């Protein structure tokens, strides 16, 4: 500090300051035992003093420039330390404020938020995230489909009609199931696989129609080409149950047999096994159903009482497989299968499933992992099939059994006249007027 033209450093203060200067005047220091408050502490210059005749070093070096005390009333070159006003480095908005001009308040005023810009970028971010998730989900789901059925191997096919026809098959495949799971689900341990249910779902501009084909339907096995061997097997005119075609040569022969006995072109094939069916039901949290009457079946493990109840995977499988508990075993079972599919489709499509990723993705994963489809089946085709089935089972379309005229040797014989009318209406994508059993 400068006193009477003499430069005094802070570390020289105790010896170099005279007693006359140690007064109790405001801002001039004190000789009292108690330290002064920050408000009255004088400003000092730190660092080495400049040589006589030289100016003080410029502001910088990591320590802000401090003014020299002159006469106890103010500071040289008009600088105010700010202790009297509470601002050490100048008034905000003034010359000492690095933020620039302001309103003179304690802090610089923040600019008003640009809400239009914020909303725009928030919307862009959300749309981008949605696109990324959607694309990722599509490729994830597409990779899970088992496209194992080659319909190009089917020979002598009918012409393609209007709309799309899906053949939906529930098989008794036990692939991937442990011995404990087979016991729990009452599936048995038979080798190979057979069809437990078969349905044709037609979608078109005049609504959708779901036709159940009883597994005991009486059909003729036509000439066909082996799906594995490529060898042609001549038809003998022998009549068997419809599910025998699947047991003989798998999905390709089943499609060939249905097309040959109906004249209806099958566009896509979808199959699900026992384990996959139960997994879907469990993933969706069970399916609520109301039964008009209770029934038991020791073969399928069914044991149901009348009334409203929620079926888990094991119970659902028993419900759709049961036929020994009914007099008209196969026809009653197909009606129960349609009834359950209606409840399952409704449960899958509820907001609690669709909007909940912790339920949606496990449900999709369980379904896609267990489906076997044809090589030309896309996810869009699969989605079209699901929504059409949901609409039919929800009352927006028509569901029926194949028209039956009687039985022969334990096989159910189709009503040829009604079947022809039904097939013609489906081919032309017309409203179905035929009723089934």
Image (cartoon, rainbow, N blue to C red):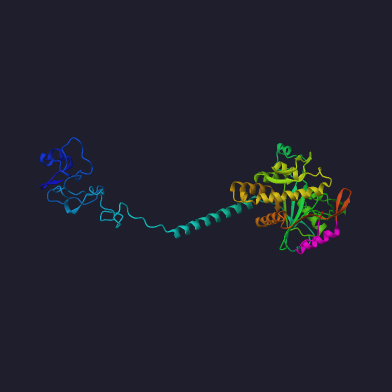
Residue 11 seen anywhere in this rendered image of the structure: yes
> In front: 64, or 152?
64
Residue at image point 78% right, 49% down: 334
Q: Is residue 63 above or below residue 388?
A: above
Looking at the image, the residue that sits furthest to the right is 409
Residue at image point 61% right, 54% down: 138
Residue 172 seen anywhere in this rendered image of the structure: no
User: Residue 421 vs residue 101: left or right?
Assistant: right
**Magenta stretch encompasses residue 137:** no
> In front: 147, or 75?
75
Quadrant location of the N terminus?
Answer: top left
Provide residue 141's location: percent of width, then percent of height: 63, 51
Provide residue 309's location: percent of width, then percent of height: 70, 43
Q: How many marks?
A: 0
> In front: 35, or 291?
291
User: Residue 157 vs residue 87: left or right?
Assistant: right
Residue at image point 85% right, 58% down: 416
Provide residue 403's location: percent of width, then percent of height: 83, 55
Chain part drawn in magenta: 415-435
Looking at the image, the residue that sits furthest to the top is 33
Say which quarter of the image contains residue 375.
bottom right
**Magenta stretch encompasses residue 427:** yes
Provide residue 333's location: percent of width, then percent of height: 79, 47
């Amino acid at each position: 500090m400068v006193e009477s033209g003499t430069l005094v450093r802070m570390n020289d203060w105790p010896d170099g300051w005279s007693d006359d200067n140690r007064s109790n005047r405001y801002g001039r220091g004190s000789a009292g035992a108690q330290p002064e408050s920050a408000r009255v502490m004088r400003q000092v210059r730190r660092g080495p003093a400049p040589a006589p005749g030289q100016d003080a070093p410029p502001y910088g070096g990591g320590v802000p420039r401090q003014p020299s005390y002159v006469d106890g009333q103010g500071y040289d070159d008009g600088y105010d330390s700010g202790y009297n006003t509470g601002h050490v480095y100048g008034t905000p908005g003034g010359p000492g404020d690095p933020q620039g001009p302001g309103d003179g308040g304690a802090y610089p005023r923040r600019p008003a938020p640009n809400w239009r810009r914020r909303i725009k970028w928030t919307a862009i971010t959300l749309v981008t995230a949605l696109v990324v998730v959607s694309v990722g989900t599509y490729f994830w789901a597409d990779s899970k489909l088992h496209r194992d059925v080659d319909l190009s191997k089917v020979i002598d096919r009918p012409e393609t009609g209007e709309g799309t026809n899906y053949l939906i098959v529930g098989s008794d495949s036990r692939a991937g199931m442990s011995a404990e799971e087979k016991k729990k689900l009452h599936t048995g341990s038979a080798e190979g696989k057979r069809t437990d249910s078969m349905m044709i779902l037609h979608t078109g501009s005049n609504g959708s129609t779901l036709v159940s084909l009883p597994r005991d339907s009486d059909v003729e096995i036509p000439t066909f080409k082996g799906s594995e061997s490529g060898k042609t097997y001549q038809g003998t005119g022998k009549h068997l149950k419809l599910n025998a075609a699947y047991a003989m040569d798998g999905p390709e022969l089943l499609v060939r047999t249905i097309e040959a006995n109906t004249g209806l072109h099958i566009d896509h094939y979808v199959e699900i096994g026992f384990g996959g069916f139960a997994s879907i039901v469990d993933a969706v949290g069970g399916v609520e159903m109301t039964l008009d009457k209770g029934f038991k079946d020791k073969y399928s493990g069914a044991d149901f009482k009348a009334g409203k109840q929620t079926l888990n995977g094991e119970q659902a499988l028993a419900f759709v497989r049961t036929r020994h508990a009914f007099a008209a075993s196969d026809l009653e079972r197909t009606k129960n299968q349609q009834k359950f599919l209606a409840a399952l489709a409704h449960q899958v499509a509820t907001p609690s499933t669709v909007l909940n990723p912790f339920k949606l993705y496990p449900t999709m994963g369980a379904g896609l992992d267990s489906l076997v489809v044809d090589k030309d089946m896309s996810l869009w085709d699969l989605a079209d099939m699901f929504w059409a089935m949901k609409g039919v089972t929800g009352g927006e379309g028509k569901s029926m059994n194949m028209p039956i005229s009687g039985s022969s040797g334990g096989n159910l014989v189709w009503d040829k006249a009604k079947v022809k009318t039904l097939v013609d209406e489906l081919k032309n994508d017309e409203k179905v007027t035929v009723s089934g059993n």
